[in-house]
Image (cartoon, helix red, strand yellow):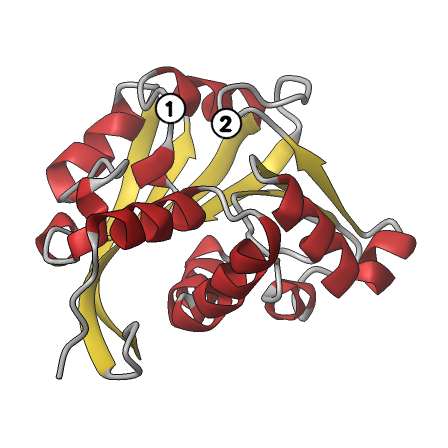
Amino acid sequence: MEKEWSTDELKQIAQQLGKPDGPSGIATAERMAENNGGMTARTIQVMDVSEHDNILEIGPGNAAHLHLLFDLLTTGHYVGVDIAPTMIQEAERINSALVKSQQASFELTDGEHLPFEDGTFDKIFTVNTLYFWKDPVKYPVEIYRVLKPGGVLVMTITDKSFMEKLPFTQYGFQLYDRVASTEVLTQAGFVIDSVSEEVDSTTGMLGQTVERDILIIKAVKS
């Protein structure tokens, strides 16, 4: 029998997905790393990483996926920014060797500003964070600013058609389809290179196999 979730439980799930905190947040991040694994792997593939790239990830969670990136990134550098202190701590713990060697670093941000100089990064990527952006008009402009001319942003989300079926997304989520998500980027000055509509197989909250429609958007700073 499918579990009946209370309003408080649904709000708590939504809050932890948006900003994982404490022991529950650590557990949530572990589930997200597993459930979003396929989306993250495809995002990295579409990003077409070069060995020397300077890469920024927005909202890495616990960053358990970095081994996928560093199979490709040999002489470059990675920075992950997150709004959750718990996630920064977990990401640094899980990737302690990369942090110690100064190949990777993690920074706490406010979700509105990026503490980097103009044109710092060759590539930027983010998976399933768009729903939580405080200002989806100004934040893409900030992302555009820290990307080098000709640099690439790959933004992957789960399509609105699937997300609106989940009971917790009515609390604090802004959902997007193909048109709305690409418009967020074009209004900031990005040129859309490609949009891939795919089906991702993952595991639901009750352990069941779930197939969801996802969008992988590759955009370029002109």
Residue placed at 8% from the left, 54% from the top? 161
Q: Can you identify the residue that label 2 sits on? A: 111
Residue placed at 62% from the left, 66% from the top? 64
Q: x%, y% of residue 134?
A: 38, 24
Res 127 seen here:
no
Residue placed at 16% from the left, 67% from the top? 4
Asked if residue 217 is positioned above or below residue 46 in the image, the reply reads above
Residue placed at 47% from the left, 24% from the top? 144
Query: Callout 1: helix, strand or loop?
Result: loop
Q: Can you identify the residue that label 1 sits on? A: 134
> Which of these two is toward me, 7 or 33?
7
> Quick check: 145 left or right of 91?
left
> Quick check: 31 left or right of 134?
right
> Which of these two is toward me, 201 or 54?
201
> Quick check: 212 left or right of 117?
left
Res 119 seen here:
yes
